């Protein structure tokens, strides 16, 4: 059986775990009244906030920008992304992200990851 979590970590690179915060996950799961998958929380803790190849955005419940809890609350109210965004995505304004917080990864296949 393929270890998909290990495969993703190997593809993206060493985890940084900049915002790993069990208390933030506990608050979010209590608010949602459900437990989130452990593999999902491991990936989010390892890399978030990040956008992979312009298609997959991972937000974290412990960050001020790209906050997972805020995004879930907005989606519950509006049924889609930030009101007026027209994209269905819930990312914060790029001006709130400093260049020190941004990274770009690319693989041999040409896929690009940015943070």
Image (spheres, grey):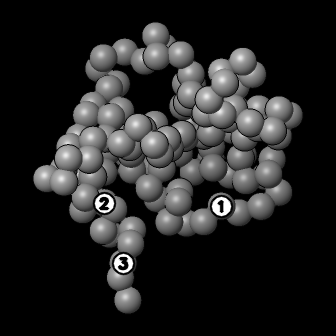
- Of the numbered discs in the image, which one, if any, rests on residue 9? 2
Q: Residue furthest left?
A: 108
Q: Secondary structure at mark 3?
A: loop
Picture quarter with the C terminus: top left
Q: Is residue 8 above or below residue 81?
A: below
Judge whether 96 appears above or below 106 on screen.
above
Nearest the eye: 16 or 72: 72
**Dot 1 corresponds to which residue?**
36
Residue for point 26% across, 47% down: 111
Q: Residue furthest front?
A: 86
- Dot 1: element: loop
Instruction: Report crowding for label 2: few under 14, some 14 to 19, many 20 or more residues within 10 A (C-alpha).
Output: some
Residue 112, image x, y percentages: 27, 41
Locate residue 69, reporting x and y percent. Answer: 69, 38
Q: Along the horizontal axis of the image, is 13 left or right of 20?
A: left
Q: Is residue 63 visible?
A: yes
Residue wearing tag 3: 3
Disc 3 crowd, CA 10 A, few/some/many (<14, 14-19, 20+): few
Could you tell me how far apart the alpha carbons at marks 2 and 3 are, in whole angstroms?
A: 10 Å
x then y, percent, for residue 109: 19, 54
Secondary structure of the residue carrying numbered label 2: helix
């Amino acid at each position: 059986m393929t270890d998909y979590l290990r495969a993703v970590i190997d593809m993206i690179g060493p985890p940084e775990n900049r915002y790993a915060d069990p208390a933030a996950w506990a608050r979010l799961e209590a608010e949602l009244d459900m437990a989130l998958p452990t593999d999902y929380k491991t990936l989010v803790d390892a890399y978030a906030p990040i956008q992979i190849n312009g298609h997959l955005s991972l937000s974290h419940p412990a960050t001020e920008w790209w906050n997972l809890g805020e995004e879930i609350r907005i989606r519950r109210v509006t049924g889609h992304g930030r009101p007026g965004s027209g994209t269905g995505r819930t990312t914060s304004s790029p001006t709130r992200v400093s260049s020190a917080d941004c990274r770009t990864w690319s693989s041999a296949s040409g896929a690009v990851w940015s943070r």
